[in-house]
Amino acid sequence: DTLFFRDMFRLTSIGLEHAILCYANFVNGIVSTPYAIMIDEEMKCVVIAVRGTRSLEDLVVDVQFVPESLEKIGRVCGFRGEDRYCHKGFLARSKWMYNDIKKSKVLKTLHSDQSPFKDYPLVLCGHSLGAGCASILSLMLRPSFPSLQCFAYEPPGCIFDDELSEECSEFITSFVRHDDLVPRLSYHNFETLRDEFFNAFARIKVPKIELFFHLKVPYSERFVALRNAKVLRPKEDIPTGTIFNEQLELFRAERAEKNSRGVNRVQLFIPGKIVHLVDISGDGNYVPYWARRGEFNQLEISKRMYADHDIHSLVEILRDTRLGGANTISLAFHNAPLIYVDDEDDSENDVRLFAFCSNPYGKLPIILWVLGLIATSLSTNASIGCDFVRVSFDAANVNGTLSLAYGIFTYELLDCDTSTGPCDKIQDYMDNTECVPYPPKLEHGGYGQTGLIFHGLAGIFGWFALSMLLISMCFIFKQRTWRIITVLLLGVTLFEGLVLLLGREFSVWCSEPDAVCSIGADAIKVIVACCIWFLMAIGSGYLAMVGKRSETRIENIGEGNELEESPQTDQKNQSS
């Protein structure tokens, strides 16, 4: 009787004011599975929701994907189960839920004559493992509830055999998101993947270490064929007299004989009608179309094959996806028009953007990075030295000529090298003491302060440029990123040059009458560093042009994958 007290069990705490919880099981074991029975007053239906994979027990059930006969279950539930097969692990859980629902008598109470929900149709739904269990449970309940509908969100690709999957199209609709791995998981798909791996292995014509260096570099679709031609033989040129080929043929013969005698001879598929949500442009705008089961008979190795199985983002996608213009996907979506496409192999081209130390741009970023370290070392050594500028002048309080060398932060006095004769030029003076800091009372002029600022900016820009060059050894940059690196390197060149030009103003001594100033060894280091930074900017500019061409190729690949309607299926859509 408490089932009819609506406000007592309304799910307002989770934002579902229109939903009433009637029954829930939270026990999770190898056979038992969490599920709930609810009433959706907005859609006016009774909903059975089955939870997906969340525990170790769920994973154990997932891997039990061998076919199991439905003959006995069909006799009990009232449907034809002869020569019908389904996922063994999901069948065990579906039988448990069927018995649990029967013992609780919830559905019987909800559809009794006294119930205000007696005319509400039954809807089953679930995600992943829950989608597989909901599909089998809907088959078991349909003789009692002929109008029921099941919505399987991203179910595993091994639920029913081909004939039964087609028969269930009347009441089961499956959703598959883009490159989701789970709807492509099945025993036969693993067998196909294994055979393709052995075929590719037999075609290798280069040493394995050379192949390793080829594989760790990300290639765009345009260059994959060129790479494959370099490392793989044509399929018709695979050597047949090798020990490997003989062992491979023996292995395949044994597997084929075993599969022909066991239950694995039956291939399992995604049940019912299939709505494939395709992200054509990669910006999250999905296009739905009616897909065929054969489209998921191969594992798609993609960078997003795991992320596409996320249930939370799938909910938002289903809310945002538009069908037939203004019609939005809902529980009644099976009456809305969808897009039909040709049964062509138009798989998305996956371009990897990241691979550790893969050097996607070759050796040039490495060379630039090493040059940057050299330039940084020269600039740093020059900044801590005190031989940036040498000056000689007659000091009023010193008997004779005062000669010294100074840098950005330190200076030193110079002595005349009498062994070579009189010191007529400042170059004739030699170092006397170690570099010492400037006295507190001796402050830099305005030009000197500006030079210090430029020196600091050069260090900051150089550090960012080197960091981004290091990242480019593993990551494919877009053109604008290389442009930023080029601007940073040109900035370093400019700031280091300004430091050199303003170096003569670092001290008040160069403004003394009859003062003679000349550049020292540290200034020469700065000049060499400026040349290196400028060469690096040229190299980065070249990579910016290469990045533009790669970006254009990727965009062309994306445009080539747009789904087009075929005239035949368009007529079929209009007739429906």
Image (cartoon, rainbow, N blue to C red):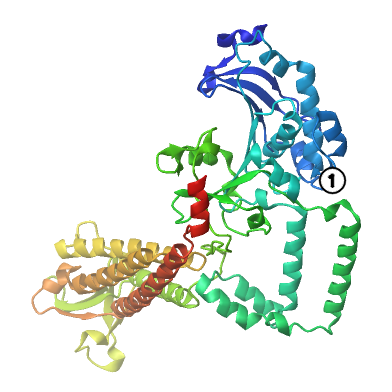
Tell me if I can see residue 407 in this picture: no
The quarter holding residue 345 reads bottom right
Q: Is residue 9 left or right of residue 281?
A: right
Q: Which residue is mark 1?
A: 83
Task: Indicate whether 454 appears above or below 157.
Answer: below
Residue 402 at what x, y percent from top left? 19, 76
Q: How packed is label 1: few (under 14 Cα within 10 Å), some, or many (20 or more)?
A: few
Q: Residue at x 9, y 80 (%)?
A: 514
Q: Secondary structure at mark 1?
A: loop
In front of the other: 286 or 34: 286
Residue farthest front in this picture: 575
| Quarter of the image with the N terminus in it | top right
Q: Is residue 512 left or right of residue 8?
A: left
The quarter holding residue 115 reads top right
The quarter holding residue 257 reads bottom right
Residue 265 at what x, y percent from top left? 84, 55
* Amino acid at pointer 1: Asp
Residue farthest left in this picture: 513
Residue 186 at what x, y percent from top left? 74, 52
Residue 50 at what x, y percent from top left? 68, 31
Task: Indicate whether 166 appears above or below 137.
Answer: below
Task: Indicate whether 522 appears above or below 300.
Answer: below
Tell me if I can see residue 404 in this picture: yes
In front of the other: 403 or 298: 298
Q: Is residue 347 left or right of residue 94?
A: left
In front of the other: 282 or 82: 82
Q: Count all numbered tags in the image, as a single digit.
A: 1
Q: Residue at x 10, y 73 (%)?
A: 512
